[in-house]
Image (cartoon, rainbow, N blue to C red):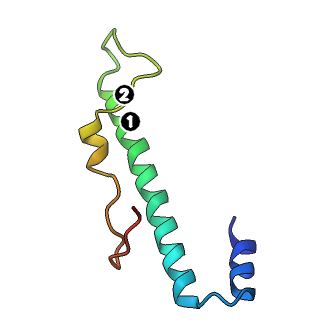
Amino acid sequence: MGQCQLERLRLAGVPEHQIDAVIEIARHIRDEASQKLDVAFDEAASNENSPEITADKSPDVETIEAVCCTPTASGQSCC
């Protein structure tokens, strides 16, 4: 869950501000992934009566791009 890696980084002398930046970026990426999943669920739910829906149907690229790779709250880039 990351605690072991945090301890290793600290023992290796990585500055705390760099560790904080990595944590912020990791959380941001996790949140964006969750948003993408929500978009896929929402799209599937709105199309549930459509006969052409398959298990492999992906959300529209434009919709995904709307929730993809924005800077973190402090302005860190995750790209």
Contact? badges 2 and 1 (CB < 8 Å): yes
Q: Position of residue 22 (x, y in %)?
A: 53, 74
- The residue tagged with tag 1: helix, strand or loop? helix
Say if 2 sits above or below 56 in the image: below
Q: Position of residue 18 (x, y in %)?
A: 53, 84
Q: Which residue: 70% across, 86% down?
A: 10
Could you say whether the residue bearing mark 2 is in a helix, strand or loop? helix
How many circles with numbers are drawn on the protein? 2
* Amino acid on which the number 1 mark rests in the picture: Ala
79 vs 12: above or below: above
* Picture disc at residue 69: none
Q: Say which residue label 2 marks.
A: 44
Marks 2/1: CA–CA distance: 6 Å
Which residue corresponds to the image point at 53% horizontal and 82% vertical from the top-left?
Answer: 20
- For this view, does 73 lie left or right of residue 24? left
Residue 31 x %, y %? 44, 58
Q: Name the residue under label 1.
A: 40
In the rendered image, the quadrant that contains the N terminus is: bottom right
In the rendered image, residue 21, in percent from the top left (x then y), is placed at: 49, 79
